[in-house]
Image (cartoon, helix red, strand yellow):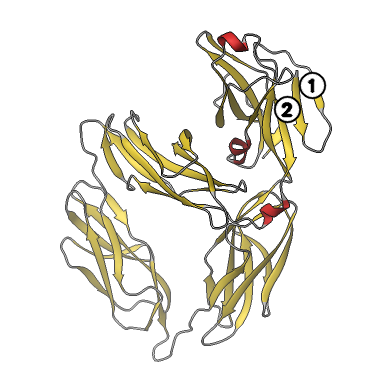
């Protein structure tokens, strides 16, 4: 028997033809209202260093710093190339990786708190090589001029760069204005002088090459060239004040988005509010605030853009928030194998996108359910962390009995939505 159970709802039963495992069910419960104000945890990879290189079969220490501003950390997962390798429920949050295949690998950590909020760390990249050493790219940054600096038309601009290579030498540095090469040098100090730039805003970038032909581009610096003898317009200042970063809401959500904006040499003409790069609404008068209603379930990056009376614009830093469905799957319920006691070592949950064939497709998420006890002819296992780790979308799931004699996969569950 195959079941789909929702807390607070009715039990729906679907007859299916199974192998050894007789069925799988998903229990869905309403999300707590308190989650609207829960702040997400913070998590970052502390080891290994980004870009580190290891020889084949060398152990790699994978350590994580995680904390929660309004609760406790309950689970930290260690992922390599988006596949869960191991997890822990207590500090110190660390594991050791071994026998990674030669090549470039992405390391990510996910932390969960006691209110079921979660955060994914920034990626760390490591290279596992054979007996040869992989060349590391150079580093390069613009040291002059200061970003946002303003110059009169015709004034010379000193364009200076810091460049180094961890395992070799710098052989060439190029100086670019608006993505066009202006000049280059092959020796330190890495500097040039720019003149006669047209009035307006210009983007300055440097590119460094090393002796093994690896190269790196610097972050951009912007400068403004004003009309000769007249001061240039200063861009406005804008800061998001609401919602708080990391806030979680329940769909369909109503969210207040607010910003502070000012201009040192003019007035604010308008403030535009964006979510994931799409304009939500514009406010032309202070206080700058809008009500964003009927927001669907997804993760959002919210920004504000302030524009002054002279046409200059400034983009605020982003704030990341989450809007979750009113209910999410939390428990797998399945009829155990007929030889549960004698031949089954464990059961494994696998999640697939709707439309995939579970018998031949690779799952997008897996969870080792262990070997739950049988109660009233059924086994139950908590899968909330697995489901909350999925990207928004529609999915199906199967459960597979695993043992020394082989494995058998159930028929897929009914469709559910993350």
Q: How far is the residue under mark 2 from the one under mark 1?
A: 9 Å
- Residue highlighted by disc 1: 14
Left or right of 275 on screen, residue 265: left
Secondary structure of the residue carrying tag 2 is loop
Dividing the picture into quadrants, the one containing residue 295 is bottom right
Residue appearing at x 21%, y 38% in the figure? 133
Badge 2 vs badge 1, beta-carbon distance below 8 Å: yes
Give percent across and percent down for residue 383: 62, 33
Which element carries disc 1, helix, strand or loop? strand
| Residue 338 picture quarter | top right
In the image, what residue occupies the spot 69% across and 13% down? 18
Residue 54 visible in the current orientation: yes
User: Residue placed at 27% from the left, 56% from the top?
Assistant: 139
Q: Residues within 10 Å of mark 2 (few under 14, many from 20)?
A: some
Task: Give the residue at mark 2.
Answer: 414
Q: Is residue 209 above or below residue 205?
A: above
- Residue 365: image x %, image y %? 56, 32
């Amino acid at each position: 028997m195959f079941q789909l159970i929702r807390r607070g709802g009715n039990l729906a039963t679907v007859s299916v033809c199974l192998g050894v495992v007789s069925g799988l069910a998903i229990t869905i419960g309403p999300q707590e209202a308190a989650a609207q104000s829960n702040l997400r945890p913070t998590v970052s990879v502390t080891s290994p260093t980004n870009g580190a290189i290891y020889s084949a079969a060398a152990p790699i220490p994978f350590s994580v710093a995680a904390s929660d501003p309004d609760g406790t950390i309950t689970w930290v997962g260690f992922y390599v190339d988006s596949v869960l390798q191991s997890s822990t429920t207590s500090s110190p949050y660390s594991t050791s990786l071994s026998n990674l295949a030669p090549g470039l690998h992405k390391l990510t950590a996910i932390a969960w708190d006691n209110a079921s909020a979660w955060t994914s760390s920034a990626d760390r990249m490591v290279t596992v090589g054979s007996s040869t050493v992989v060349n590391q790219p150079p580093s390069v940054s613009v040291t002059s001029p200061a970003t946002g600096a303003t110059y009169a038309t015709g004034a010379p601009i000193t364009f200076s760069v810091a460049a180094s290579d961890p395992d070799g030498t710098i052989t060439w540095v190029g100086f670019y204005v608006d993505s066009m090469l202006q000049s280059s040098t092959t020796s330190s100090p890495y500097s040039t002088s720019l003149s006669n730039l047209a009035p307006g805003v210009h983007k300055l970038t440097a590119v460094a090459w090393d002796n093994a032909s690896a190269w790196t581009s610097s972050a951009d610096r912007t400068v403004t060239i004003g009309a000769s003898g007249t001061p240039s317009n200063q861009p406005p200042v804008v800061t998001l004040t609401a919602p708080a970063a990391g806030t979680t809401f329940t769909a369909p959500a109503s969210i207040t988005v607010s910003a502070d904006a000012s201009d040192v040499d003019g007035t604010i003409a308008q403030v535009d509010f964006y979510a994931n790069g799409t304009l939500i609404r514009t406010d032309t008068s202070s206080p700058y605030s809008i009500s964003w209603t009927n927001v669907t379930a997804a993760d959002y990056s919210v920004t504000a853009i302030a524009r002054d009376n002279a046409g200059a614009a400034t983009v605020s830093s982003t704030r990341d928030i989450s809007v979750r469905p009113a209910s999410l799957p939390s428990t797998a319920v399945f009829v155990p194998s007929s030889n549960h006691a004698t031949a089954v070592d464990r059961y494994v949950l696998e999640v697939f996108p709707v439309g995939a064939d579970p018998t031949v497709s690779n799952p997008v998420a897996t969870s080792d359910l262990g070997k739950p006890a049988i109660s009233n002819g059924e086994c139950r296992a908590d899968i909330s962390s697995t489901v909350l780790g999925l990207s928004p979308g529609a999915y199906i799931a199967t459960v597979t009995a695993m043992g020394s004699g082989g494995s058998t996969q159930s028929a897929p569950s009914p469709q559910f939505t993350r």
